[in-house]
Image (spheres, rainbow, N blue to C red):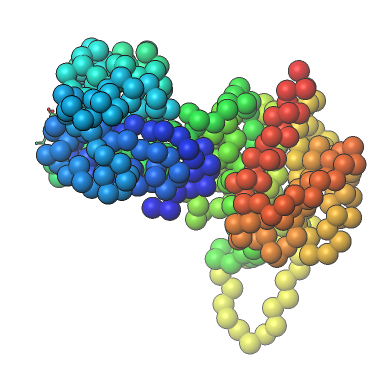
Amino acid sequence: MRVDEAVASRLRQKHVVLGVTGSIAAYKAVGLASALVQAGATVDVIMTEAATRMVQPLSFQAITHRPVHVDLFAPLAETEIGHVTLGQQADLLLVAPATANTLAKLALGLADNLLTTTALAARCPIVVAPAMETAMWHHAATQDHLATLRQRGVIVVEPEAGYLASGKSGAGRLADERRILATVARLFTPQDLAGRHIVVTAGGTREAIDPVRFISNASSGRMGYAVAEAAAQRGARVTLISTVRHLPAPFWVDVEPVESARQMRDAVLAAIPQADALLMAAAVADYRPADVAPQKRKKGSDEWVLRLVPNPDILEEVKATKPPGLVVVGWAAETHDLIENARSKLRRKDLDLIVANPVPQTFGSDRVQATLLFRDGTIVPLEPLSKVALANRILDIVAERLRHRR
Ligand SMILES: Cc1cc2nc3c(=O)[nH]c(=O)nc-3n(C[C@H](O)[C@H](O)[C@H](O)COP(=O)(O)O)c2cc1C
């Protein structure tokens, strides 16, 4: 799996102890270890005896380039990195998959193997990702132990419902690797947008011609998704108003699907009264077909002339109705006179900040050479950045504005 940049940027140079227990899902921990290593983390794996029956320690050793720890009483392990030091030096203890048995031991504070002893000695955050059969998952004992662990601050990445090793379907399947990594990354992210509600728009709007045809533009939606994901990672409650169907929804983000500019306008105006910031990364069509045919137009030899009418200007309507203190960020995608056009849009629409991008280079690309223009006239040209890095730069400014608003 290619590791998401938003995740990798938070895990670089972190020291993660990965605890692997005797679940049939232990093989998935090999992929997880690889993703952590690819993200730049140092990974020390501790396996329980039962885990070594499922997967060979050598697999983890080959991936992490470090010895794998199993035996609490191994003299070498104890002299090199004792059970106490391992837990105390780490930035994170991640137990994935976590069996019902190990969860019970952790809740009770038992220390009868290297993993549970390390957990008891650890001073770092602990994340557990349980995996087990549905009946074990729903058992009152398992749920009580999880409640105890949560109460102590342990973060639980809930298992998903799906196909299980037994051949049945139900709750208990190890959470998706992306979700586990996103949870870990969030732990290492300053929560400077906690308690804030951020509304983000993404994608090019689709303006219907008939039931199967539409006019749209080349916007991929990746900028808006990067902003939404980064804001959620920084603790914000995020509403993502999106026309995009091909990108996975970022975790902890409420996605509101829309298609046309008018639907997007309605969704934005409904969301902003409770919001702290609006980031309009969507490419909203300026025009739409004047008439939408109720049926698919059949092929013919005649010319087909489409008449277009202007769409509502969402940011103009936001300007007229926005609650006091709402921080509004717009984007200007221009093929020519980029800075002039962006400055004029910033003023006309009373924005706090506008992100000027040259197009078509920016559409669909991972890197952007953006220029930031502020309300007070300041212009900041940025170095070429990934959309994730640019999203975080923009959110730094939004967080700063919101801090000063109080
Ligand atoms: C093939 C097989 C698959 C198992 N899968 C799971 C599982 O997914 N989740 C679980 O909680 N226990 C599972 N168990 C039971 C655990 O291996 C058993 O409870 C063991 O004592 C766990 O030890 P540990 O927590 O020290 O790793 C499985 C057992 C076998 C034989």
Please tell me which residue lies in front, 271 or 96: 96
Please tell me which residue lies in front, 380 or 60: 60
Quadrant for the C terminus, please: top right
* In the displayed structure image, the side of residue 361 where residue 6 appears, left or right: left
Residue at left 26%, top 44%? Answer: 60
* In the displayed structure image, the side of residue 171 where residue 194 appears, left or right: right
In the image, residue 69 above or below residue 83: below
Please state the horizontal and vertical placement of residue 313, each as a whole percent of the image.
Answer: 79, 48
Please tell me which residue lies in front, 326 or 106: 106
Please state the horizontal and vertical placement of residue 139, each as a whole percent of the image.
Answer: 19, 21
Please tell me which residue lies in front, 190 or 177: 190
In the image, residue 166 above or below residue 102: below
Residue at left 31%, top 13%? Answer: 148
* In the displayed structure image, the side of residue 147 where residue 336 appears, left or right: right
Q: Is residue 28 visible?
A: no
- Quadrant of the image occupied by residue 98: top left
In the image, residue 328 above or below residue 264: above
Q: Quadrant of ligand 1?
A: top left
Residue at left 37%, top 13%? Answer: 152
- Quadrant of the image occupied by residue 193: top right
Q: Is residue 372 visible?
A: yes
Task: Tell which residue pokes out farthest to the bottom in this image.
Answer: 301
Please state the horizontal and vertical placement of residue 145, each as a whole percent of the image.
Answer: 26, 16
In the image, residue 94 above or below residue 117: below
Count of numbered tags:
0
Residue at left 61%, top 22%? Answer: 195
Please state the horizontal and vertical placement of residue 20, each as a whole percent of the image.
Answer: 24, 34
* In the displayed structure image, the side of residue 400 where residue 184 appears, left or right: left
